[in-house]
């Protein structure tokens, strides 16, 4: 049993659907508990930002659990069945691990190196901890992810200049 995930992100999912999928922090505990129970997940956490909604999980059969999660999500977003099916990217094992590290290190961000994503991953982690939907595997993994992301920011040039979507937009717009 290894890591599996479902991602809906700016590369694969239209903005209108990402907005519908976004979950306020206050709603995450109930959602995580329900997903864990209904989809037979051993561990689960969720990352919900403006550019991505991702569920990281462990289950005895990751691909089957992913299909179950997708069906569960379709029931909650009726009318979006086809878009959900088309936009969902499911990863298992090593590709899922690589993806989580890349996300936390802001290598999968719309603007390479943007600093907000690590805080958002930490928030999703903390909510899953508080909800008791994490176990030893995801807890240990996230500790390694945070350590790697910190090293990337401090040991590479990725944090050298301020970056964000709004910063890039202002730069492209030029002087007032």
Image: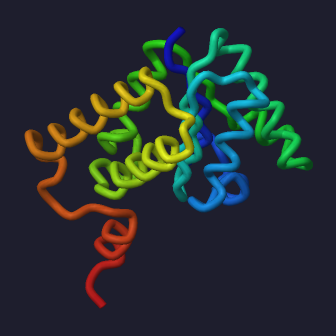
Which coloring applies here?
A: rainbow
Residue furthest toward the right?
79
Q: Is residue 50 above or below residue 101?
A: below
Residue positioned 17% across, 53% down in the render: 159
Give percent across and percent down for residue 118.
34, 49
Q: Residue at x 39, y 23 (%)?
A: 98
Direction from residue 14 to residue 47 in the image, left or right? left
Query: From the viewer's perspective, is 66 left or right of 95?
Result: right
Q: What x and y, as percent, mark residue 39? A: 75, 26
4 vs 22: above or below = above
Quarter of the view holding residue 15: bottom right
Q: Is residue 11 above or below residue 120?
A: above
Residue at the image point whose x is 18% and y is 39% from the top: 152
The quadrant in which the C terminus is found is bottom left
- 158 with respect to 143 (left or right): left
Q: Position of residue 131 (x, y in %)?
A: 56, 44
In-image side of 45 versus 40 (left or right) = left
Within the image, what quadrant is residue 50 found in?
bottom right
Q: Please state the horizontal and vertical placement of residue 167, each as a whole percent of the image.
A: 31, 70
* Residue at the spot 33% in from the left edge and 44% down from the top edge: 106
């Amino acid at each position: 049993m290894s890591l599996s995930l479902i991602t809906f992100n700016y590369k694969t999912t239209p903005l209108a659907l990402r907005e519908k999928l976004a979950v306020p922090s206050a709603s995450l505990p109930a959602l995580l508990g329900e997903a864990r129970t209904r989809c037979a997940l051993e561990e689960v956490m969720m990352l919900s930002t403006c550019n991505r909604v991702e569920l990281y999980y462990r289950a005895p059969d990751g691909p089957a659990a992913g299909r179950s999660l997708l069906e569960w999500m379709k029931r909650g977003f009726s009318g979006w069945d086809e878009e959900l099916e088309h936009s969902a990217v499911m990863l298992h094992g090593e590709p899922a691990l690589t993806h989580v590290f890349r996300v936390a290190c802001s290598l999968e961000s719309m603007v390479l190196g943007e600093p907000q994503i690590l805080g958002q991953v930490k928030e999703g982690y903390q909510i899953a901890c508080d909800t008791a939907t994490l176990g030893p595997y995801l807890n240990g993994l996230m500790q390694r992810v945070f350590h790697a992301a910190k090293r990337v920011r401090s040991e590479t040039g990725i944090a050298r200049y301020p970056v964000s979507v709004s910063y890039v937009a202002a730069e492209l717009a030029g002087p007032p």
